[in-house]
Image (cartoon, coloured by chain):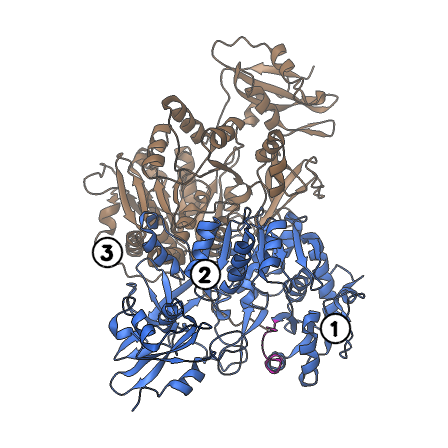
Chain colours: A blue, B brown
Amino acid sequence: MLGIMQDWPLTVNKILEHAKRINPTREIITRRVEGHIVRTTYANLFDQSKQVSNALIDSGIQLGDRVATLGWNSERHMASWYGAMGIGAVLHTINPRLHPEQVAWIANHAEDKVLIFDKTFLPIVEAIKDHLQTVKTFVIYADADTMPENSLGAIPFDIWIDGRSTEVRWGDFPEDTACGLCYTSGTTGDPKGVLYSHRSNVLHTLITMGKDVMGMGADDVVLPVVPMFHANAWGLALSCPAVGSNMVMPGAQMDGASIYELLDTEKVTITAAVPTVWLMLLTHLQENNLKLPHLKKVLIGGSAIPEKILRAFEQDYEVDVVHAWGMTETSPLGTANALLERHAGMTEEEQAKVRESQGRPPYGVELKIVDDEGSTLPEDGAAQGNLRIRGHWVVDSYFCAEPGTTLASDGWFETGDVASIDADGFMTIRDRSKDIIKSGGEWISTVELEGIAVGHPGIVDAAAIAAKHEKWDERPVLVAVKAPGAKVSEKDLIAFFSDKVAKWQIPDTVVFVDELPRNATGKVLKNKLREAYGDVLLA
Amino acid sequence: MLGIMQDWPLTVNKILEHAKRINPTREIITRRVEGHIVRTTYANLFDQSKQVSNALIDSGIQLGDRVATLGWNSERHMASWYGAMGIGAVLHTINPRLHPEQVAWIANHAEDKVLIFDKTFLPIVEAIKDHLQTVKTFVIYADADTMPENSLGAIPFDIWIDGRSTEVRWGDFPEDTACGLCYTSGTTGDPKGVLYSHRSNVLHTLITMGKDVMGMGADDVVLPVVPMFHANAWGLALSCPAVGSNMVMPGAQMDGASIYELLDTEKVTITAAVPTVWLMLLTHLQENNLKLPHLKKVLIGGSAIPEKILRAFEQDYEVDVVHAWGMTETSPLGTANALLERHAGMTEEEQAKVRESQGRPPYGVELKIVDDEGSTLPEDGAAQGNLRIRGHWVVDSYFCAEPGTTLASDGWFETGDVASIDADGFMTIRDRSKDIIKSGGEWISTVELEGIAVGHPGIVDAAAIAAKHEKWDERPVLVAVKAPGAKVSEKDLIAFFSDKVAKWQIPDTVVFVDELPRNATGKVLKNKLREAYGDVLLA
């Protein structure tokens, strides 16, 4: 027997339709790449998005075709998203921080037909234009006055959509239709595409609106520093219009002073970014003796939160910190850290330990940790295992991958992280699976060792790696960068670990280097370090 | 092109499975009908629900079969919901406040096979047992010690499930499978059944978790005074386990002292009920000089909120009031009233006017107002029209109704209410469509007239009705009940309206009566009043 309720497909165009109907005057405030601020409303964004749809149809875009962007967060970028998604095209956000060769590789792999981009990225597009095999139309986020010279035959975005009809049919396709495409930037191998569906995006939107995740409402003003090209913008381009929050879009300027100016003038209540951004902001606040009277909540993800950021926000500025974890493959919300009632009675130190955790999965996703044979490990806060995830907004298969090659044999997605999970479901990332050090059957977290090393006043950067060892298979070796002028010795640094970890977890030796090798998005290339120093403990 | 994300059907069993996995130790605290408090956890509730499933299977229940309850809010009632829904049976909540004849009619119409009930309702079941055509199994919420004598061959609930396996397959059917059944109790005609699907219930759950609706989290303690047999319990039996809120179940005792005791001892943070309950609570608080230090939010629905309740909660007790509106046919959430940023700058009086509104629809439902010909009216806050609604959790057709007979010709559900909608989407119920007074082409709200009348110190109850009129078609007549000993005259009362509504809205005459006729659920029977007094203005 079936229920007898009304229904329609869960497609993302319904989100902007709702915003237009219920919150037409709520605003999207954007800092242009030229530096000035422009304001628009959800009602205008709706019309603009419909015009983008008609422009795309004119450019030959049909259901399922890929439309790429290389764009900062802006209302024009939002209009591109909804304009493409509304007609069932796939909006493909390309990360402009990748090497130009990778950008070209990704655009060709995705078979993008239209490429819309900020003029900041014109040099990239000019450099790769001869390698782009499928892009027929280039559009630059600009008007006639701000349009840069180019050799692409590109059209200014504003002119591309100007005067077009705002009438076009949106939706009207099944909810599992493809909606967005985002490639992961691993440290090795080719990038892999994650193809979100309308359904997965809408369900992700609904769950992120909950109190224990982002919890925004119509009276909030949200500043997504996290870029729309990064892991689906943490869903904010969908969840803000769904509830009617104002959106403040920082464009290309994400330095401390620029972010502070937006937080202050627009009375931002919720913001979201990776720790690096917050370090810049906090430095700016401290140097200029500024406060954050309007800000209530900051979402931090992308990497572990340094304790000083947590403490500064909560104690110096009275802003709640929500530590969240996810991946491009998980839309991205995997977990969020909201303290429980019973944590209120804990000591500050105990609370800090819970706060360091990446948090708990909301309804709709499930986590587990397994050993190298795939057997489930206990959730006792101590056992470390390979983290697997499944859920409504978790990848099933990479774009164009052979079916069945993306997931583990049990049907769960292997995150590539090593984690522990405690009895309350709080998950803590311990390491990347390929980085963790397996010493005599025990697993040693390189993340933990690195956190301790950079806590030494003479060390500014550090990476722990597994070095081959005759007796223990692997033992930790620390590769460290000294602070300018610091006189720290290997012996000093090894001694610094003695009261902080178990004896068998202390690195066997330290290699001092001038700089750690990193990829385009700032991740340390540990495979390079293992190649260079993986044999230092062998005779 | 389809997205390539993982997925599974949106079935409600996944909610309790999530609670068991992530919030196993969070509690459901119940006041038994015997008066004492019992505590259980989501982990135990999960096991108990699985045992109910096995008991139901043993009783011959299969996919789609109806399982009825006549029950107060309790953890046993929760286990019955999940136990039935998990195996794809339909949990049918019957309202015990209906006339026993109606209870029998509903149970027969639904073809309920199992009836599980609180012993409070044994007299009802005994009275109708010979009329129940399909019920084969009677179960009473009791253990061996508390089991009442009966002539039904009924089984005590605890013994019915005791010792049964906690292994049974849940879910594994399509998400549009029927899940719950609830009959509306109109003032006229036979009750009509609304058959919720798993999908409609899950989507309703996700949206009610948002900040501008209920906004509960894992650290909240929620007391649903609203009964599980009333409009799907406002979704709380689903949304609380979805986030891990503790639930406090009041059982049969909903007087001010009992509710206060639970609010206080269990440190309740969010509670929900109709205004009558809050009047009893506020009286108890005032008489005993008590405070509400833990309570943060109160959800009020079911009828318009008297201003004194709003003011008392917000000013005297510093509790946020969320005014919500819905119907059995809308699962029930239709709208919720959360003030906007821009309301902060308004005068108290202006704010109060916004607060009186029933609020705005969340993503997933849409409202409109139409005239008697079905043409859409402007959303300007002034125009009054017939309120129509559509959405993911709005009825499509009543249970066993001829297809196409439930909705208006445009496919929207006709609520039977007259409302206005302002430019921000705030909807205000003005009247029931069949009650509103159509005087010379203008519509006069009986709700507004009644609100003014009971504001007179000499009047305790009042109903305004449309009386036939030779010139204006209809004119308002007020039927009023005086306070004991009050000496108010017709002339006094008419004069009392003069500065509160336009002249043409003032009632033509007043009829004083000892008592207003009401149905089983407390609604005034205006059709009876129109029969009695509808001709008083004719010559």
Residue B182 counted in the magenta span: no
Q: Are marks 3 and 1 in contact (CB under 8 Å)?
A: no
Q: Give the residue displayed 59% in from the left and 9% down from the top.
A: B489
Residue A193 image point, x, y percent: 54, 76
Residue highlighted by disc 1: A59
Q: Chain of mark 2?
A: A
Image check: A139 left or right of B105? right
**What is the magenta range?**
A93-103
Residue B197, visible in the rendered structure = no
Residue A98 counted in the magenta span: yes
Image check: A509 left or right of A1? left
Circle number at residue A324: 2
Residue A432 image point, x, y percent: 40, 74
In the rendered image, the vertical position of residue A513 relative to residue A496, given as above or below: below
Q: Give the residue displayed 43% in from the left and 55% down from the top.
A: A311
Q: Amino acid at mark 2?
A: Ala
CA–CA distance in space, label 3 to label 1: 64 Å
Q: Give the residue displayed 39% in from the left and 46% down from the top.
A: B220
Quarter of the picture holding the C terminus of chain A: bottom left
Q: Nearer the viewer, mark 3 or mark 1?
A: 1
Name the secondary structure under disc 2. Answer: strand
Q: Give the residue displayed 34% in from the left and 28% down from the top.
A: B257
User: In the orientation shown, which residue stands out farthest toward the bottom?
Assistant: A539
User: In the orientation shown, which residue stands out farthest toward the left?
Assistant: B145
Residue highlighted by disc 3: B164
Neighbourhood count class around disc 3 (C-alpha, 10 Å): few under 14, some 14–19, many 20 upward: some
CA–CA distance in space, label 1 to label 2: 39 Å
Name the secondary structure under disc 3. Answer: loop
Are tags 3 and 1 found on a single chain? Answer: no
Neighbourhood count class around disc 2 (C-alpha, 10 Å): few under 14, some 14–19, many 20 upward: many
CA–CA distance in space, label 2 to label 3: 40 Å
Comparing A292 with A425, the one in front is A292
